[in-house]
Amino acid sequence: MKILILDDSEDRMERFKEGIERLKSQGVTVWTTYVYNQNTAMRALDSQKDFDYIFLDHDLDNEQLEYKEENNGLNVVDYLIKINYKKDVNIVIHSWNIVKGCEMKRRLENAGYSPVQQPGAWNLVGT
C-alpha cells in the first residue's frame, strides 16, 4: 500500500506515523510519503502515479488561508484534477477547516473522485 500524507503539523504527522507503524506491525506492507507543503505534495504526485491513499490537510503553515493564497490543500486538489490523477485513489480530507474541507470535497466529487471528509483522520490510521 502506498500512502501520501500532506500536513504541516509535526504532532499530527507523528500520530500518522504511529498509525502506519501499527499497520506494519500487523503485517501490512506500507510505503509512506510524508509532505509538509503543497509544492512537495505536487512533486510527489508527479513522480508517483500509484498512491492508494492520499490524506490532505487544507491549512498549511499553521494558518487558515483563503483559497487564492499559496500553500494550502485546495491547491493540491486542483492539481490532482489538473493532472487527472487516477480516479480510484482513496482521498481523505482530514482538515479541521470544515469550510475549506467541504470545498475540497466538492471539487474532487465534481471531477469524478470519491473523497472522504474526516477531520482528525490521523487518529484512525492503523486502528
Image (tube, helix red, strand yellow):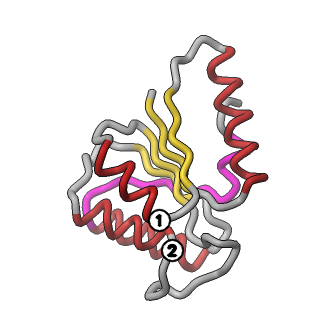
Q: Nearer the viewer, residue 92 or 50?
A: 50
| Sequence-wise first label, 2 or 1 | 1
In whole angstroms, how far apart are the C-alphas of marks 2 and 1? 5 Å
Q: Tell me what residue is drawn at x 21 percent, y 57 percent.
A: 84
Q: Tell me what residue is drawn at x 36 percent, y 54 percent.
A: 43
Q: Which residues are magenta?
A: 111-124
Quarter occupied by residue 115: bottom left
The reply to whether dot 2 and dot 1 touch (C-beta < 8 Å) is yes
Q: Which residue is mark 1?
A: 38
Q: Quadrant of the C terminus?
A: top right
Amino acid type at mark 2: Asn
Q: Looking at the picture, does residue 59 appear above or below residue 11?
A: below
Q: Which residue is mark 2?
A: 71
Q: Considering the numbered disc 1 on the image, is that residue within a helix, a strand or a loop?
A: helix
* Residue 19 image position (x, y, % from top left): 70, 33
Q: Quadrant of the N terminus?
A: top left
Q: Tell me what residue is drawn at x 45 percent, y 72 percent.
A: 74
Magenta region includes residue 68: no
Q: Tell me what residue is drawn at x 51 percent, y 41 percent.
A: 33
Amino acid type at mark 1: Gln
